[in-house]
Image (cartoon, rainbow, N blue to C red):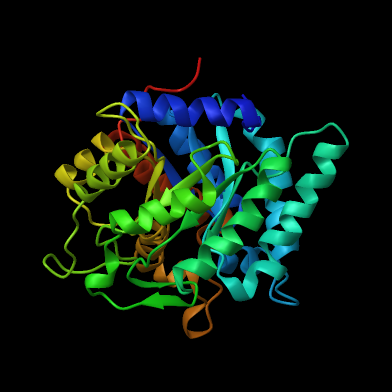
Amino acid sequence: MPIATPEVYNEMLDRAKAGKFAYPAINVTSSQTLHAALRGFAEAESDGIVQISTGGAEFLGGQHNKDMVTGAVALAEFAHIVAEKYDVTVALHTDHCPKDKLDGYVRPLLAVSEERVKAGRNPLFQSHMWDGSAETLSDNLAIAQELLERARAAKIILEVEITPTGGEEDGVSHEINDSLYTTVDDAVRTVEALGLGEKGRYLLAASFGNVHGVYKPGNVVLRPELLKELNEGIASKYGQPAGSKPFNFVFHGGSGSTAEEIATALENGVVKMNIDTDTQYAFTRPVADHVFRNYDGVLKVDGEVGNKKTYDPRTWGKLAEAGMAARVVEACGHLRSAGQKIK
């Protein structure tokens, strides 16, 4: 099946929440990492999400001019073609976009999809993320309102991050401290600004101690049970039945999380989990192994000629793709999306 239509993407998210599973959202930076993600989803019989961060888009745009929009559009168009060959449904998403990059990334990409929809086509991307976690909550939500209105018109889902995720990603960093926990008051203010779907559907990256990157055990204290408190607080305030889950949560900074922490997050409404650090390593590790095992072939040591078959990018590239795909399969198992593809 090709890239998800807006209707199918909504169905994917509804199925995940009802079934208490989540889609791995895999960051990609090349056609090869895209194929690795698609292959992993196909092998796990899981639908999924592939996403491009601002740094990833800049890399895709080429080092000559590093144009983020060019890079993101090019890979998205490529994905619309090659995804046809994989028997899974995939949504395209743009990851973390802070305020100073909105005009050079998300807003132009929204305009691309607006034109496509006006012409009777589907949007290029199925969702975009606005990362206003470095702003005051008031400013964050004011920008989110503007973006949500445009996203809804373009049949796109908006992801918002209302409070910080620790660590660093693409130049946006936050300290690891007590501010990494979203409060019920934060959630109430979010609903007051963005509604509960009537103004447009959105995904919520709430903070429960999440940290980007890799840290030793004990340095990060995750509290995924906090998501239950946020849902209960909103359900109570807005007269929804006990046990309802008003929010579609996103799990950021999940590398190294325990099976128990992931399971708790899924039970409490997480429908999307971002995975980047682990898949980066899974892609690079086989390449390093290949180089170490074939040192004299990969390099022309001491005036020798090397071995073309070992330094051919296709040789080590196939190993990298297989390594990353295997990690995606593993993620699908952890998030219970394996075997859940839309038939």
The residue located at (71%, 60%) in the rendering is 107
- Closer to the camera in the image, 303 or 166: 166
Residue 33, given in percent of the width and then of the height, sits at 53, 51
The answer to whether residue 2 is left or right of residue 241 is right
Residue 308 shows in this picture = no
- Closer to the camera in the image, 241 or 134: 241
Q: Which residue ends up furthest to the right in the rendered image?
A: 119
Residue 83, given in percent of the width and then of the height, sits at 63, 34
The residue located at (70%, 73%) in the rendering is 66
The answer to whether residue 233 is left or right of residue 138 is left
Q: Hey, which quadrant is residue 215 in on the image?
A: bottom left
- Closer to the camera in the image, 307 or 257: 257
The answer to whether residue 157 is left or right of residue 25 is right
Residue 114 shows in this picture = yes
Residue 65, given in percent of the width and then of the height, sits at 75, 76
Q: Which residue ends up furthest to the top in the rendered image?
A: 343
- Closer to the camera in the image, 130 or 240: 240
Which image quarter holds the N terminus? top right
Residue 310, given in percent of the width and then of the height, sits at 50, 60
